[in-house]
Amino acid sequence: MGWDKAGAGFKHPGLWFPTLAVLLLGACQAYPIPDSSPLLQFGGQVRQRYLYTDDAQETEAHLEIREDGTVVGAARQSPESLLELKALKPGVIQILGVKTSRFLCQRPDGALYGSLHFDPEACSFQELLLEDGYNVYRSETYGLPLHLPSPNSPYRDPVPGGPVRFLPLPGLPPAPPDPPGILAPEPPDVGSSDPLSMVGPSQGRSPSYAS
C-alpha cells in the first residue's frame, strides 16, 4: 500500500514542481557561484617591466623616469627605465620607477612627470592589451593615451594622433654585489703535493713529504 501511495504522487507532477523550486533556490543562496574571471586575480599583482615603444617615434625608446621627475624616452634599457607595474584594480595599474621611487603621472594636457607621491587621480592608468602583444595605457581620469615626451622638451606631448603602443619587456634588478670582507677561495695548486692544502705548514708535515 505504501508504494501505491508513493506512486500515486508521481502521477501528479504538478505537486512536485513548487517543492523542487524551493529546494533549488535555497541551495543557490547557501552556495553562491564564485566569479571565475581571471581579471579579479590581478589585484595587488606586481610586475617589473621595461616599457618599450617604436610607434610614432623617430627612434626606438624605453620609457624612463629620472631622478628630477622628468620622463623621457631612452634608446637603451637603464636602471631608470626599469618600472614596477602594480594592479590597483582589474584593468587599472600604477607605474613606479624602481630606482627613482617616482610614480608615473599625467597632467590634464597629457604631459608626463614623475612624482614622489602617488595621486590616484593623476597616476592611475588603464592597461589595454592588444592582440600583437603590445599594450596601450590611458589615464583613468583624463582618458588621454600615454605618449613619450618630445626629445626637445620633456614636458611636451609629441604629435597628437593614435595611442602609442608599448611592449612590456620583462626586467629584473641587477644582482646585489658580494658583501665586503669575503674573498673568493683561491684555485688549488695542481703542481703542489698538497693541492687542497689539507696539510699544515712544512714543520708539521710527515717526513715522507720531504723526500
Image (cartoon, rainbow, N blue to C red):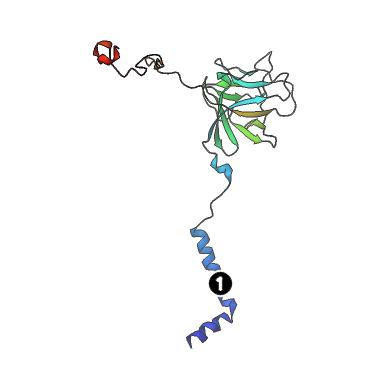
Q: Secondary structure at mark 1?
A: helix
Q: Is residue 76 left or right of residue 161?
A: left
In this picture, residue 183 sits left or right of residue 23: left
Judged from this view, the residue extending furthest toward the front is 211
Residue 179 in percent (x, y) is at 40, 18
Numbered marks: total: 1
The answer to which image quadrant residue 109 occupies is top right
Q: How far across and down, in percent of the image, does residue 193 sit?
A: 35, 15
Q: Residue 73: x percent and y percent?
A: 65, 19
Q: Position of residue 162 (x, y in %)?
A: 74, 29
Q: Is residue 27 above or below residue 100?
A: below
Residue drawn at x 65%, y 31% as measured from the top left: 138
Towards the viewer: 138 or 128: 128
Locate the C terminus by quadrant.
top left
Callout 1 amino acid: Pro
Q: Is residue 190 left or right of residue 107?
A: left
Q: Quadrant of residue 69?
A: top right
Decide if residue 198 is on the left or right side of residue 28: left
Residue that carries the numbered disc 1 in the rendered image? 18
Q: Residue at x 59, y 35 (%)?
A: 92
Q: Residue furthest bottom?
A: 1
- Is 29 above or below relative to 177? below
Q: Residues within 10 Å of mark 1 (few under 14, many from 20)?
A: few
Residue at x-position 54% and y-position 42%: 41
Q: Tell which of 64 and 143 is nearer to you.
A: 64
- Residue shown at 48%/85% (left/top)? 2
